[in-house]
Amino acid sequence: MVHDPENLHRRKFLRDSIASATALSASGFGLGLLQSRLAIAQSAEQNYKALVFLFLNGGNDANNMIAPTGGALRTRYETGRGSIALPAQELHPISVAEPVQLSDGNVQSDFGFHPSCEQLAQLFDAGHLNVVCNSGNLITPVDRQAYIDGTVALPPYLYSHADQQRQLQSEPSNPFRYGWGGRMAELLAGYNTDPMVSSLITLSGLNAFQVSRDGLLSPYGLSNDGALALQGFSQLRSTMVEAAMSAASAGDELLGQKYADVFRSARTAEVIVRAAFDEAAANGIDYDAIFQAAGGTNSRTQRRLKTVAKMIAGKSSMTNQRPVFFVSMEGFDTHQSLLAPHAALLSDLDASIKGFHDSLVEQGDFDSVVTMVGSEFGRTFTPNGNSSTAGSDHGWGGHTVFMGGAVNGSRLLGTHPDFRLNEGLDTGRGRWIPTTSNSQCAAQLARWMDVPEAELQAIFPSTVNFTGAPAPEIFA
Protein backbone atom coordinates (compact mmCIF):
# COMPACT_ATOMS: atom_id res chain seq x y z
CA MET A 1 0.00 0.00 0.00
CA VAL A 2 1.26 3.47 -0.92
CA HIS A 3 0.78 6.17 1.73
CA ASP A 4 0.45 9.87 0.98
CA PRO A 5 3.23 11.60 3.00
CA GLU A 6 1.15 14.76 3.34
CA ASN A 7 -1.78 12.83 4.79
CA LEU A 8 0.55 11.04 7.20
CA HIS A 9 1.98 14.35 8.41
CA ARG A 10 -1.50 15.82 8.83
CA ARG A 11 -2.69 12.82 10.80
CA LYS A 12 0.39 12.90 13.03
CA PHE A 13 -0.03 16.63 13.64
CA LEU A 14 -3.68 16.12 14.63
CA ARG A 15 -2.72 13.29 16.98
CA ASP A 16 -0.08 15.49 18.62
CA SER A 17 -2.58 18.32 18.94
CA ILE A 18 -5.23 16.14 20.54
CA ALA A 19 -2.72 14.52 22.90
CA SER A 20 -1.66 17.90 24.18
CA ALA A 21 -5.20 19.20 24.44
CA THR A 22 -7.07 16.48 26.28
CA ALA A 23 -6.89 18.41 29.52
CA LEU A 24 -8.47 21.57 28.17
CA SER A 25 -11.99 22.62 27.29
CA ALA A 26 -12.63 22.48 23.58
CA SER A 27 -14.31 25.85 23.84
CA GLY A 28 -10.75 27.18 23.81
CA PHE A 29 -8.56 29.39 25.95
CA GLY A 30 -6.76 32.09 23.98
CA LEU A 31 -3.11 32.79 24.52
CA GLY A 32 -4.08 36.28 25.64
CA LEU A 33 -5.45 34.82 28.87
CA LEU A 34 -1.89 34.21 29.99
CA GLN A 35 -1.61 37.90 30.82
CA SER A 36 -3.84 37.37 33.86
CA ARG A 37 -1.88 34.41 35.16
CA LEU A 38 0.47 36.17 37.55
CA ALA A 39 -2.27 38.26 39.16
CA ILE A 40 -4.31 35.16 39.92
CA ALA A 41 -1.24 33.28 41.13
CA GLN A 42 -0.63 35.60 44.09
CA SER A 43 -3.68 34.22 45.88
CA ALA A 44 -3.14 30.69 44.55
CA GLU A 45 0.20 30.24 46.29
CA GLN A 46 -1.29 31.06 49.69
CA ASN A 47 -3.54 27.97 49.70
CA TYR A 48 -1.69 25.46 47.56
CA LYS A 49 -1.82 21.70 48.10
CA ALA A 50 -0.66 18.93 45.78
CA LEU A 51 -1.08 15.17 45.86
CA VAL A 52 1.48 12.92 44.16
CA PHE A 53 0.64 9.23 43.68
CA LEU A 54 3.72 7.11 42.94
CA PHE A 55 2.32 3.74 41.89
CA LEU A 56 4.55 0.67 42.24
CA ASN A 57 3.24 -1.36 39.33
CA GLY A 58 3.24 -5.14 39.63
CA GLY A 59 2.82 -5.80 43.36
CA ASN A 60 5.63 -4.65 45.64
CA ASP A 61 7.07 -7.24 48.03
CA ALA A 62 6.30 -5.26 51.18
CA ASN A 63 7.48 -8.10 53.43
CA ASN A 64 11.04 -7.26 52.41
CA MET A 65 10.69 -3.49 52.01
CA ILE A 66 10.22 -3.32 55.79
CA ALA A 67 11.18 -6.30 57.94
CA PRO A 68 11.65 -7.09 61.65
CA THR A 69 15.15 -6.93 63.07
CA GLY A 70 14.50 -8.86 66.28
CA GLY A 71 12.04 -10.58 68.59
CA ALA A 72 9.63 -13.42 67.90
CA LEU A 73 8.53 -11.73 64.70
CA ARG A 74 12.09 -11.98 63.38
CA THR A 75 12.10 -15.74 64.00
CA ARG A 76 8.84 -16.17 62.10
CA TYR A 77 10.18 -13.94 59.32
CA GLU A 78 13.30 -16.06 58.80
CA THR A 79 11.35 -19.32 58.96
CA GLY A 80 8.57 -18.22 56.64
CA ARG A 81 10.61 -16.33 54.06
CA GLY A 82 13.26 -19.00 53.74
CA SER A 83 15.60 -18.35 50.83
CA ILE A 84 14.29 -14.80 50.26
CA ALA A 85 14.77 -13.58 53.85
CA LEU A 86 17.05 -10.57 54.32
CA PRO A 87 19.78 -10.72 57.00
CA ALA A 88 18.85 -8.61 60.02
CA GLN A 89 22.26 -6.92 60.09
CA GLU A 90 21.77 -5.61 56.54
CA LEU A 91 18.50 -3.81 57.28
CA HIS A 92 18.50 -0.09 58.09
CA PRO A 93 17.03 0.14 61.61
CA ILE A 94 14.33 2.75 62.23
CA SER A 95 13.21 4.46 65.42
CA VAL A 96 9.43 4.20 65.64
CA ALA A 97 7.66 6.96 67.56
CA GLU A 98 5.41 4.36 69.20
CA PRO A 99 5.38 0.55 69.36
CA VAL A 100 3.91 -1.20 66.34
CA GLN A 101 0.68 -3.11 66.84
CA LEU A 102 0.85 -6.73 65.66
CA SER A 103 -2.17 -8.74 64.55
CA ASP A 104 -1.78 -11.22 67.44
CA GLY A 105 -2.25 -8.42 69.98
CA ASN A 106 1.42 -7.98 70.80
CA VAL A 107 3.59 -4.96 69.97
CA GLN A 108 7.10 -4.65 68.58
CA SER A 109 9.48 -1.79 67.86
CA ASP A 110 12.36 -3.55 66.11
CA PHE A 111 12.04 -2.96 62.37
CA GLY A 112 14.25 -1.86 59.52
CA PHE A 113 14.03 -0.79 55.91
CA HIS A 114 15.44 -2.87 53.06
CA PRO A 115 19.23 -2.59 52.58
CA SER A 116 18.59 -0.50 49.44
CA CYS A 117 16.44 2.01 51.34
CA GLU A 118 18.87 3.78 53.65
CA GLN A 119 17.53 7.24 52.75
CA LEU A 120 13.91 6.18 53.27
CA ALA A 121 14.92 5.03 56.75
CA GLN A 122 16.51 8.43 57.39
CA LEU A 123 13.40 10.27 56.19
CA PHE A 124 11.30 8.04 58.43
CA ASP A 125 13.44 8.82 61.47
CA ALA A 126 13.29 12.54 60.63
CA GLY A 127 9.49 12.39 60.83
CA HIS A 128 9.03 13.14 57.13
CA LEU A 129 7.21 9.94 56.24
CA ASN A 130 5.17 7.14 57.73
CA VAL A 131 3.94 3.72 56.64
CA VAL A 132 0.45 2.25 56.88
CA CYS A 133 1.08 -1.44 57.47
CA ASN A 134 -0.88 -4.20 55.76
CA SER A 135 -3.20 -2.00 53.74
CA GLY A 136 -5.13 -3.36 50.79
CA ASN A 137 -8.36 -3.45 48.85
CA LEU A 138 -11.32 -4.28 51.10
CA ILE A 139 -15.09 -3.88 50.92
CA THR A 140 -15.64 -4.70 54.59
CA PRO A 141 -13.49 -6.07 57.44
CA VAL A 142 -12.52 -9.70 56.80
CA ASP A 143 -11.34 -12.47 59.10
CA ARG A 144 -9.79 -15.77 58.08
CA GLN A 145 -12.77 -17.98 58.89
CA ALA A 146 -15.21 -15.79 56.99
CA TYR A 147 -12.80 -15.82 54.06
CA ILE A 148 -12.62 -19.63 54.11
CA ASP A 149 -16.40 -20.00 54.52
CA GLY A 150 -17.16 -17.48 51.79
CA THR A 151 -19.50 -15.53 54.07
CA VAL A 152 -18.00 -12.08 53.57
CA ALA A 153 -17.88 -9.71 50.59
CA LEU A 154 -14.45 -9.70 48.98
CA PRO A 155 -12.94 -7.40 46.37
CA PRO A 156 -13.66 -8.96 42.96
CA TYR A 157 -10.87 -10.92 41.30
CA LEU A 158 -8.41 -10.91 44.16
CA TYR A 159 -4.76 -11.36 43.13
CA SER A 160 -5.40 -10.07 39.58
CA HIS A 161 -3.11 -7.20 38.58
CA ALA A 162 -5.57 -5.34 36.37
CA ASP A 163 -8.54 -5.67 38.71
CA GLN A 164 -6.68 -4.82 41.90
CA GLN A 165 -5.01 -1.84 40.24
CA ARG A 166 -8.39 -0.46 39.20
CA GLN A 167 -9.79 -1.02 42.69
CA LEU A 168 -6.82 0.66 44.37
CA GLN A 169 -7.29 3.64 42.08
CA SER A 170 -11.09 3.75 42.41
CA GLU A 171 -13.30 1.86 44.89
CA PRO A 172 -13.57 -1.94 45.26
CA SER A 173 -17.26 -1.97 46.23
CA ASN A 174 -18.48 -0.64 42.85
CA PRO A 175 -17.87 -1.53 39.20
CA PHE A 176 -15.29 0.84 37.79
CA ARG A 177 -16.66 4.19 36.60
CA TYR A 178 -14.06 6.69 37.70
CA GLY A 179 -10.90 7.04 39.77
CA TRP A 180 -10.85 8.73 43.13
CA GLY A 181 -8.15 11.12 41.93
CA GLY A 182 -10.30 12.19 38.99
CA ARG A 183 -13.44 12.62 41.07
CA MET A 184 -11.52 14.50 43.73
CA ALA A 185 -10.18 16.93 41.12
CA GLU A 186 -13.72 17.58 39.86
CA LEU A 187 -14.91 18.39 43.37
CA LEU A 188 -11.93 20.69 43.90
CA ALA A 189 -12.38 22.57 40.62
CA GLY A 190 -13.27 25.72 42.57
CA TYR A 191 -9.67 25.88 43.80
CA ASN A 192 -8.42 26.10 40.23
CA THR A 193 -9.17 29.76 39.65
CA ASP A 194 -8.13 29.80 36.00
CA PRO A 195 -7.74 26.15 34.99
CA MET A 196 -6.23 26.54 31.54
CA VAL A 197 -4.48 23.22 32.13
CA SER A 198 -6.14 20.35 33.97
CA SER A 199 -5.29 19.80 37.63
CA LEU A 200 -4.86 16.11 36.70
CA ILE A 201 -1.29 15.69 35.47
CA THR A 202 0.15 12.32 34.46
CA LEU A 203 3.70 11.35 33.60
CA SER A 204 2.71 7.74 32.92
CA GLY A 205 -0.09 7.95 30.40
CA LEU A 206 -3.74 7.11 30.93
CA ASN A 207 -4.66 5.52 34.25
CA ALA A 208 -7.77 4.58 36.22
CA PHE A 209 -6.85 6.88 39.11
CA GLN A 210 -7.38 10.08 37.11
CA VAL A 211 -10.59 9.16 35.26
CA SER A 212 -13.22 11.77 36.19
CA ARG A 213 -16.84 10.86 36.91
CA ASP A 214 -18.54 13.59 34.89
CA GLY A 215 -15.92 13.94 32.18
CA LEU A 216 -15.24 17.50 33.28
CA LEU A 217 -11.49 16.92 33.45
CA SER A 218 -9.02 14.75 31.58
CA PRO A 219 -5.39 14.12 32.52
CA TYR A 220 -2.76 16.36 30.97
CA GLY A 221 0.18 14.25 29.84
CA LEU A 222 3.81 15.22 30.31
CA SER A 223 6.89 13.40 29.08
CA ASN A 224 9.50 12.17 31.54
CA ASP A 225 11.34 15.46 31.12
CA GLY A 226 8.53 17.97 30.77
CA ALA A 227 6.15 19.45 28.26
CA LEU A 228 5.25 17.76 25.00
CA ALA A 229 5.69 20.14 22.09
CA LEU A 230 3.67 19.93 18.89
CA GLN A 231 6.06 18.41 16.39
CA GLY A 232 6.92 20.41 13.32
CA PHE A 233 5.27 23.58 14.60
CA SER A 234 7.77 26.39 14.11
CA GLN A 235 8.68 29.40 11.99
CA LEU A 236 6.91 29.45 8.59
CA ARG A 237 4.77 26.43 9.39
CA SER A 238 3.59 28.17 12.55
CA THR A 239 2.33 31.15 10.56
CA MET A 240 0.67 28.94 7.97
CA VAL A 241 -1.06 26.73 10.52
CA GLU A 242 -2.28 29.70 12.56
CA ALA A 243 -3.82 31.16 9.41
CA ALA A 244 -5.43 27.84 8.54
CA MET A 245 -6.89 27.52 12.01
CA SER A 246 -8.32 31.03 11.87
CA ALA A 247 -9.96 30.21 8.56
CA ALA A 248 -11.38 27.00 10.01
CA SER A 249 -12.89 28.89 12.95
CA ALA A 250 -14.48 31.42 10.63
CA GLY A 251 -15.97 28.74 8.40
CA ASP A 252 -19.09 26.72 8.82
CA GLU A 253 -17.59 23.26 8.73
CA LEU A 254 -18.08 21.64 12.15
CA LEU A 255 -15.08 19.33 11.88
CA GLY A 256 -12.84 22.22 10.93
CA GLN A 257 -14.03 24.27 13.89
CA LYS A 258 -13.40 21.38 16.28
CA TYR A 259 -9.97 20.85 14.78
CA ALA A 260 -9.22 24.53 15.34
CA ASP A 261 -10.44 24.34 18.94
CA VAL A 262 -8.24 21.31 19.64
CA PHE A 263 -5.27 23.03 18.04
CA ARG A 264 -5.66 26.25 20.05
CA SER A 265 -6.15 24.32 23.28
CA ALA A 266 -3.00 22.34 22.61
CA ARG A 267 -1.01 25.48 21.88
CA THR A 268 -2.34 27.22 24.98
CA ALA A 269 -1.51 24.24 27.17
CA GLU A 270 1.99 24.06 25.75
CA VAL A 271 2.63 27.74 26.45
CA ILE A 272 1.30 27.55 30.01
CA VAL A 273 3.23 24.41 30.91
CA ARG A 274 6.42 25.80 29.41
CA ALA A 275 5.92 28.95 31.47
CA ALA A 276 5.81 26.77 34.58
CA PHE A 277 9.08 25.10 33.64
CA ASP A 278 10.64 28.48 32.85
CA GLU A 279 9.61 29.64 36.32
CA ALA A 280 11.29 26.60 37.86
CA ALA A 281 14.41 27.17 35.77
CA ALA A 282 14.67 30.71 37.10
CA ASN A 283 14.58 29.76 40.79
CA GLY A 284 18.29 28.94 40.97
CA ILE A 285 17.77 25.32 42.08
CA ASP A 286 19.98 22.69 40.45
CA TYR A 287 17.57 19.76 40.30
CA ASP A 288 20.05 17.50 38.54
CA ALA A 289 22.57 18.02 41.35
CA ILE A 290 19.93 17.33 44.01
CA PHE A 291 18.96 14.00 42.45
CA GLN A 292 22.59 13.05 41.86
CA ALA A 293 23.37 13.74 45.51
CA ALA A 294 20.52 11.40 46.42
CA GLY A 295 22.20 8.62 44.45
CA GLY A 296 20.20 9.23 41.30
CA THR A 297 21.10 7.49 38.06
CA ASN A 298 18.78 9.53 35.82
CA SER A 299 16.28 6.68 35.79
CA ARG A 300 12.82 7.13 34.33
CA THR A 301 11.23 7.41 37.77
CA GLN A 302 13.79 9.97 38.92
CA ARG A 303 13.24 12.05 35.80
CA ARG A 304 9.48 11.90 36.26
CA LEU A 305 9.61 13.03 39.87
CA LYS A 306 12.09 15.75 38.95
CA THR A 307 9.54 16.98 36.40
CA VAL A 308 6.78 16.91 39.04
CA ALA A 309 8.97 18.97 41.38
CA LYS A 310 9.52 21.55 38.64
CA MET A 311 5.80 21.70 37.86
CA ILE A 312 5.10 22.38 41.53
CA ALA A 313 7.84 25.02 41.62
CA GLY A 314 6.14 26.69 38.64
CA LYS A 315 2.73 26.79 40.29
CA SER A 316 2.41 30.56 39.82
CA SER A 317 2.19 29.96 36.09
CA MET A 318 -0.31 27.13 36.42
CA THR A 319 -2.85 28.73 38.83
CA ASN A 320 -4.06 25.25 39.82
CA GLN A 321 -4.19 25.16 43.61
CA ARG A 322 -5.03 21.44 43.94
CA PRO A 323 -3.04 19.50 41.33
CA VAL A 324 -3.09 15.69 41.39
CA PHE A 325 -0.03 14.00 39.87
CA PHE A 326 0.32 10.36 38.79
CA VAL A 327 3.64 8.58 38.28
CA SER A 328 4.03 4.86 37.70
CA MET A 329 7.15 2.82 38.42
CA GLU A 330 7.16 -0.56 36.70
CA GLY A 331 8.83 -3.89 37.39
CA PHE A 332 7.54 -5.10 40.77
CA ASP A 333 6.03 -8.41 39.62
CA THR A 334 8.91 -10.45 41.03
CA HIS A 335 7.90 -14.09 40.52
CA GLN A 336 11.51 -15.15 39.94
CA SER A 337 14.83 -14.24 41.54
CA LEU A 338 13.25 -11.73 43.91
CA LEU A 339 16.33 -10.57 45.78
CA ALA A 340 18.49 -8.88 43.13
CA PRO A 341 15.75 -7.26 40.99
CA HIS A 342 13.85 -6.07 44.06
CA ALA A 343 17.03 -4.58 45.51
CA ALA A 344 17.61 -2.66 42.26
CA LEU A 345 14.02 -1.41 42.17
CA LEU A 346 14.13 -0.24 45.78
CA SER A 347 17.49 1.45 45.21
CA ASP A 348 15.88 3.43 42.39
CA LEU A 349 12.86 4.17 44.58
CA ASP A 350 15.10 5.29 47.45
CA ALA A 351 17.01 7.76 45.25
CA SER A 352 13.81 8.93 43.56
CA ILE A 353 11.98 9.69 46.81
CA LYS A 354 15.02 11.34 48.41
CA GLY A 355 15.67 13.51 45.35
CA PHE A 356 12.02 14.52 45.18
CA HIS A 357 11.94 15.22 48.93
CA ASP A 358 15.06 17.39 48.80
CA SER A 359 13.77 19.29 45.76
CA LEU A 360 10.49 20.09 47.52
CA VAL A 361 12.35 21.20 50.65
CA GLU A 362 14.72 23.40 48.64
CA GLN A 363 11.90 25.14 46.80
CA GLY A 364 9.80 25.55 49.96
CA ASP A 365 6.95 23.23 48.96
CA PHE A 366 7.42 20.20 51.22
CA ASP A 367 4.69 21.18 53.68
CA SER A 368 2.11 21.64 50.92
CA VAL A 369 2.70 18.33 49.11
CA VAL A 370 1.77 14.78 50.14
CA THR A 371 3.25 11.82 48.29
CA MET A 372 1.60 8.40 48.42
CA VAL A 373 3.70 5.37 47.42
CA GLY A 374 1.59 2.24 47.00
CA SER A 375 1.03 -0.93 45.00
CA GLU A 376 -1.99 -2.98 43.91
CA PHE A 377 -1.16 -5.75 46.40
CA GLY A 378 1.62 -7.25 48.47
CA ARG A 379 3.15 -10.62 47.74
CA THR A 380 3.17 -14.06 49.30
CA PHE A 381 5.19 -14.34 52.49
CA THR A 382 6.49 -17.79 51.57
CA PRO A 383 8.70 -18.05 48.47
CA ASN A 384 7.85 -20.13 45.42
CA GLY A 385 11.09 -22.08 45.66
CA ASN A 386 14.01 -22.96 47.91
CA SER A 387 16.91 -21.60 45.87
CA SER A 388 18.36 -18.19 45.16
CA THR A 389 16.15 -18.00 42.06
CA ALA A 390 12.95 -18.08 44.14
CA GLY A 391 10.46 -15.27 43.97
CA SER A 392 7.15 -14.39 45.56
CA ASP A 393 3.67 -14.47 44.06
CA HIS A 394 0.56 -12.30 44.07
CA GLY A 395 -0.64 -11.51 47.57
CA TRP A 396 -3.12 -9.17 49.22
CA GLY A 397 -2.14 -6.82 52.04
CA GLY A 398 1.01 -4.70 51.68
CA HIS A 399 2.49 -1.46 53.00
CA THR A 400 1.77 2.09 51.78
CA VAL A 401 4.20 4.98 52.34
CA PHE A 402 3.08 8.58 52.89
CA MET A 403 5.52 11.49 52.78
CA GLY A 404 5.00 15.18 53.49
CA GLY A 405 5.26 17.92 56.06
CA ALA A 406 1.70 17.24 57.21
CA VAL A 407 2.01 13.49 57.88
CA ASN A 408 2.16 11.77 61.25
CA GLY A 409 5.81 10.84 60.78
CA SER A 410 8.12 8.16 62.20
CA ARG A 411 5.27 5.69 62.60
CA LEU A 412 4.38 2.25 61.32
CA LEU A 413 0.64 2.79 61.48
CA GLY A 414 -2.20 0.30 61.57
CA THR A 415 -1.71 -3.38 62.35
CA HIS A 416 1.32 -5.32 61.14
CA PRO A 417 0.94 -9.04 60.27
CA ASP A 418 2.23 -11.35 62.98
CA PHE A 419 3.64 -13.70 60.29
CA ARG A 420 1.77 -16.77 61.57
CA LEU A 421 1.02 -19.14 58.70
CA ASN A 422 -2.26 -21.08 58.37
CA GLU A 423 -3.91 -18.95 61.04
CA GLY A 424 -4.53 -15.32 61.91
CA LEU A 425 -4.43 -13.18 58.76
CA ASP A 426 -3.14 -15.90 56.43
CA THR A 427 -5.33 -16.91 53.47
CA GLY A 428 -2.62 -19.20 52.12
CA ARG A 429 1.17 -18.88 51.74
CA GLY A 430 1.15 -15.66 53.72
CA ARG A 431 -1.32 -13.72 51.59
CA TRP A 432 -2.23 -11.42 54.46
CA ILE A 433 -5.80 -10.21 54.90
CA PRO A 434 -5.48 -6.40 54.98
CA THR A 435 -6.16 -4.72 58.31
CA THR A 436 -6.62 -1.23 56.81
CA SER A 437 -8.52 -0.63 53.59
CA ASN A 438 -6.99 1.41 50.80
CA SER A 439 -10.20 3.44 50.65
CA GLN A 440 -9.77 4.46 54.30
CA CYS A 441 -6.34 5.85 53.44
CA ALA A 442 -7.54 7.53 50.24
CA ALA A 443 -10.40 9.22 52.10
CA GLN A 444 -7.88 10.83 54.45
CA LEU A 445 -5.90 12.16 51.49
CA ALA A 446 -9.07 13.57 49.93
CA ARG A 447 -9.98 15.22 53.23
CA TRP A 448 -6.50 16.78 53.45
CA MET A 449 -6.96 18.13 49.92
CA ASP A 450 -10.18 19.79 51.19
CA VAL A 451 -12.76 17.62 49.47
CA PRO A 452 -16.05 18.41 51.29
CA GLU A 453 -16.77 15.92 54.06
CA ALA A 454 -20.24 15.25 52.64
CA GLU A 455 -18.68 13.98 49.40
CA LEU A 456 -16.27 11.48 50.93
CA GLN A 457 -18.76 8.66 51.39
CA ALA A 458 -19.95 9.06 47.80
CA ILE A 459 -16.38 8.66 46.54
CA PHE A 460 -15.51 5.87 49.00
CA PRO A 461 -18.80 4.09 49.82
CA SER A 462 -17.06 1.10 51.44
CA THR A 463 -15.69 3.24 54.28
CA VAL A 464 -19.10 3.14 55.99
CA ASN A 465 -18.40 -0.55 56.68
CA PHE A 466 -15.35 0.28 58.81
CA THR A 467 -16.92 2.38 61.56
CA GLY A 468 -15.85 -0.27 64.06
CA ALA A 469 -12.33 -0.40 62.62
CA PRO A 470 -11.19 3.22 62.29
CA ALA A 471 -8.27 3.97 60.01
CA PRO A 472 -4.89 4.92 61.47
CA GLU A 473 -4.24 8.66 61.44
CA ILE A 474 -2.00 9.40 58.47
CA PHE A 475 -1.87 13.11 59.27
CA ALA A 476 -0.59 14.73 62.44
Image (tube, rainbow, N blue to C red):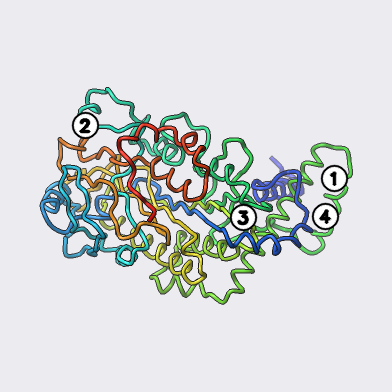
Q: Nearer the viewer's eye, disc 2 or disc 4? A: 2
Q: What residue is at 33 percent from the left and 41 percent from the top?
A: 470
The residues tagged by marks 3 and 1 sit, at their Cα atoms, a distance apart of 29 Å
Badge 1 or badge 4: first in the primary sequence: 4
Q: Quadrant of the C terminus?
A: bottom left
Is 294 drawn above or below residue 399 in the view shown?
Answer: below
Q: Nearer the viewer's eye, disc 3 or disc 1? A: 3
Q: Is residue 314 left or right of residue 389?
A: right
Q: Secondary structure at mark 1?
A: helix
Badge 1 or badge 2: first in the primary sequence: 2
**Mark 4 lies on residue:** 242
Q: Secondary structure at mark 2?
A: helix
The residues tagged by marks 1 and 2 sit, at their Cα atoms, a distance apart of 64 Å
Could you tell me residue 20's position as x and y percent? 66, 51
Q: Secondary structure at mark 3?
A: loop
Could you tell me residue 227's position as x and y percent? 62, 59
The residues tagged by marks 3 and 2 sit, at their Cα atoms, a distance apart of 45 Å
Let me know if residue 395 appears in the view.
Answer: no
Q: What residue is at 16 percent from the left and 65 percent from the top?
A: 89
